[in-house]
Amino acid sequence: MLGNFSNQTASSWMQLRRISPALVLGLLLAVAQPGSSATRQASAGPASGLDTRPDNTTCIAPQRPPQTSAVVLQSTIRTSFEPPAVVPAVNDLSVWYMVDRAGAVNRYRRSGKSFSFLNKFADTKDRSLNAFQGVPYGEMGLLGMAMHPKFSSNGFVFLYYSAAGTQGTAVEARLSRFISRDGGVNLDMSSEEVLLRVPRISQYHWGGTLNFGPDGLLYVAFGEGGQPSKSQALDSYLGKMIRINVDAAPGYKVPVDNPFVGKAGALPEIYAYGFRNPWKWSFDRLTGAIWLGDVGSSTWEEVNQVVKGGNYGWPLREGAHCSPSTPACSPAGLIDPVVEYARSPGAPGAAVIGGFVYTGTAMPGLVGVYVYADAYGKVWALRYDKQGRPAPELLVETIPIVGTFAQDEVGELYLATAGYLYLLAPAGTAEASNFPQKLSQTGCMSAANPALPGPAMIPYDVNAPLWSDGAAKERWFAIPNGSTIRRLDDGDWDLPIGAVTVKAFRLNGRLVETRLMVRHDDGEWAGYTYEWNDAQTDALLLPAGKTKTVEGQQWTYPNRNQCLGCHTSVAGRTLGLETAQLNRSKLYPTTNRMANQLATLDGIGMFSAPLNASPDDLAKLAEPFANTSPLDVRVRSYLHGNCSMCHRPNGPGQGPEDFRFSTPGVSMGAVNVLPTQSSFGIPDARLLSPGHPEKSIISYRLQTLALGRMPPLGSAMVDTAGVALVNQWIRSGLGMGVGDRDGDGFADNVDNCKNTANASQLDSDGDGIGNQCDADFNNDGRVNSLDLAVIQQAFGAKQGDAKFNANADMNGDGRINAIDLGLFQARFGKPVGDQ
C-alpha cells in the first residue's frame, strides 16, 4: 500500500491544500476585471473615470448648529429636607418619590411643573441609622431607591441605607428588596429582604445610587467607606459598582458575563472598581453609557464613563493625577476620567454631583450633553472644544448644597438642593438651527431619493477600510467650486473649508445610517449622523448618540464628540481621503468606467498641484483580505485603516505604538514592548510578541468586547477575519525577517514543522514535533516497522472510532488514510523530526 501512494502525490496534495479559496477567488477576479487593484494601473483602462469636475452649488458645509444654552432654575416645590434621590414612578408618570435621608420616602403628584405632597410612601426610621459614634448623619441614612422596571407586575422596590452592623462593625450598608402591594401608594416595610450587607467603619463615602440598566439588571455603586485600599481589593464591595439580576425572589443572581465571574478571590457581583465616593451616576438613555461623578479627596473632582471591568484608579490616583499616597503611580491599567476639575481655594468639600445626559426638547443646544454639578452650586455642561477635548461650560449657579439630579420621562432635568426642587429651563428663546434636519435637505444626496448621491458628489473607495461591524459602506465627497485639495507630505489630504464627506452604512442591504463630516467656516471639522427611517425614504439628523437593534445586531450611532474621537486632527480628520488609501481603481457609475482614483481626481483638476508621479509609483495600501500582496503589507494596511488614526506620533492613543503604514514593523514601537496601560491578565504580555498571538495585547484588544476593545467606539462585534489576519502575521514573525521556510504562516522559531507546511500546528503526542512531520508514533526515537504497524492498525479509522490513533493522523484531518501513509513513507527509516 505504501508503494501505491507516492511521495510526489503527497507533496502535490499538500500544495493544493495551501491554496486558499480567497486566493482562487482573487485570481479569478483579477482575470475577469483587468482594471482591479490586483493588476497594475497601467492596464486599468481609461486614465480618468470622469470627464469633468462636478459643479457643486448644493453640497457645501452649512453653519454649525447652536451649541450654547442659557439656563435658569425654576422652583417647582419647597421641601423640608435635602433629597439624596428623586425617583419618577415607573408605573405612573404623574407620581414622583423623594427620598429623605432621615428615613422616609415621600410621594408627590406632578402636574406640569408643579408638585404636591400625597403621602409618606415608606419609613425606614426603625432600621436605618443616621448617626455614627454620636455624630449625626455624615453621609449616612436612607440614600438610594429604585423601582423595578416590571414594578407594575411584581411591585419590587429597592432601598439602600445605613444600619447597625451585624458582621462585626458598628454600621453596615444594606441593599434590600421591598414590595408595594397597592401599586406604589405604600411600601410594605415588613416585606424587606436584605440582599447585601456591606460592613462599614466610617460615616463617610457611602455612594448609594441605584439604577436599572437597559439590560434590566440592577447596578449599585458603593463608596470606599473611609478605607481607600478597599477600592482596589476585588474581595470587597467598597469602592465598587456592582451588577446583579434581581428579577426573582428570593435573593439575586450574578450575571454570567460580569467581568470577574470565575476569578479567584474576586466578588463576582463587581462590574467596575477603583472609586472613592461615586455619589451620583446615571445611564445615558440613548446609548446606555454610564456617567459617574466620583467625589475627590482634596484636590481633584472627576467625571467617569464606566465600562465593564474598568479600574478608575482610587487610591492610586485622584482624577488623572497620582495621589499623595502614591506619588510615583503608574497609569497602567487605569482609566482616565472624561473630565476633572480642581477644587477652588477656600471651598473644601466642593464635591462633584453626577447628573444626566440631557435628552429633552426645551433646550435643543443641550441635547446629548452630559450635565453635572458641584455641591457648592455650579451646574456644568460637558462640552468639547474643536480639538475634541473636554471644555465644560458653566450653565448656571445656584445656592448650595446641591444633592442630586432627576430626569423625567421626556428627558428634562431637575436639580434638588437643600429645601428646593428646581427644573432646568431655557433662559430665553432658543437659537434656531438652520442645519439640515433631513438627509434629503443636505444638498449632498438626492432630494428625491437620498439613498443616491446628488450631482455634486464624487464617489470614492478605500483600500483598507475601518471595521464597522460588518456593514457595507458607500462613500462620496464634495468641495466648493473653485477650491482644491492639498496633498500633504505624509500622504494625508487637506480638504478646503466648505468640504463635506458622506458615508452610508448598510446591514443586509438595508440603510442604517449616513454620516457627514463637515469642514465649517471656522476651519474645524464636525461629524453629524442621520438615522434612516423604517420606510427607507429618508434619514433624520440625530441630535445625540443612540444605540438600537438593527437587522438583529446592536448598532451605535455616534454622538458629535465621538466622531472626532476617531477622526483625529493628527490623522487629518477625513481618514480615508489620503493618497495610499485612494490609490486603487474604481468603477464610476456616471461614466461606467473603471479607472484609478488618483488619476481621475488629478485629471479633473481636484488637486492644488498635479500628481508628481504615476499612481504605480505612489504609496498604496493593500487590500487586507485579498491575497495579492505579502502578508506583512496586508496587515500593516489593516492596522493603518483601523488603528493609526490614534496610534501615531502625537495621537490620542495611550502608548508608543505607531501603526501608520509608512512605519515598518521594526519601528512601530510595539514589538516586544511591555504594555503601558494594562496586561489584561495575560502572562508575559507584550504589545506585539512575535510568534505568539496569545501574548500580544494588540490581538487581545481586537477580539475583546470588554474593557480595552479596539476600536473603542461604535463597535459591538469582533472582526473575526481581521483578528485571524493579524494573528497569522504575529505567528509569522511580523514580517521582520523571521524565516518561514514552509510558508504555512508560522515563523520558524515557533513552528513545530519548519520544513513541512503544518497549518494546524497539531502535536498530538506533545513531543514538540508537529504531526505533519512526526512519523515516530510510538515515541521510541525511531521511525521503523513498529510505527508502520501503528498506522496499519489504525488505517481507515476516523476520530471517535475505538482504533483511531491521533498520533498517526499526520495531516490532522480526523482520518487515517492514504494521505497519512504517504506522509509516513517520506519519513520511513529517517531520523525523527522534520528532515
Image: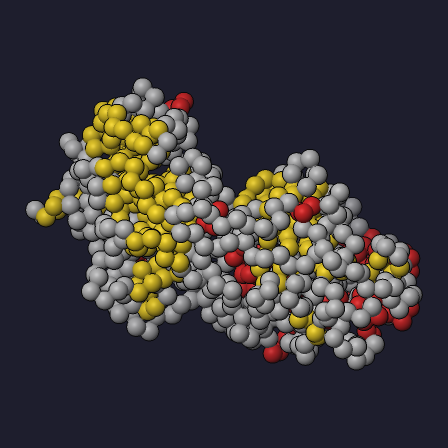
Whole-percent x and y of residue 789? Answer: 75, 54
Foreground residue among 390 and 172? 390
How many numbered discs, if any?
A: 0
- Image quadrant of residue 511? top right
Q: Residue furthest front?
A: 429
Above or below residue 476? Residue 249 is above
The x and y percentages for residue 375 are 26, 53
Give the residue at x 27% y 28%. Answer: 116
Q: Image check: 658 left or right of 54? A: left
Place of residue 359 in the rendered image (x, y in percent of width and height, measured from the top left): 46, 43
| Residue 156 in view in this figure | no
- Asked which quadrant contains residue 74, the reply is top left
Residue drawn at x 43%, y 52% is 69
Name the one closer to the observer, 552 or 789: 552
Q: Is residue 775 above or below residue 283?
A: below
Above or below, comparing residue 305 to residue 656 in the picture? above
Q: Quadrant of the N terminus?
A: bottom right
Rendered view: 164 above or below 661? above
**Is residue 93 shown to the viewer in this render?**
yes
Front residue of this view, candidates 421 and 249: 421
Residue 226 drawn at (x, y percent): 21, 55
Q: On the rendered image, what quadrant is the C terminus found in?
A: bottom right
At a point 30% along the width and 37% down the height, the residue shown is 76
> With 98 as the anchor, is 790 left or right in this view?
right
Locate residue 66 relative to residue 70 in the image: left or right.
right
Please report the residue visible at 81 percent of the width from the left and 64 percent of the height from the top: 53
Between 440 and 597, the one nearer to me in the picture:
440
* Colour theme: secondary structure
Which residue is at the far left?
A: 134
Say whether residue 125 is left or right of residue 591. Answer: left
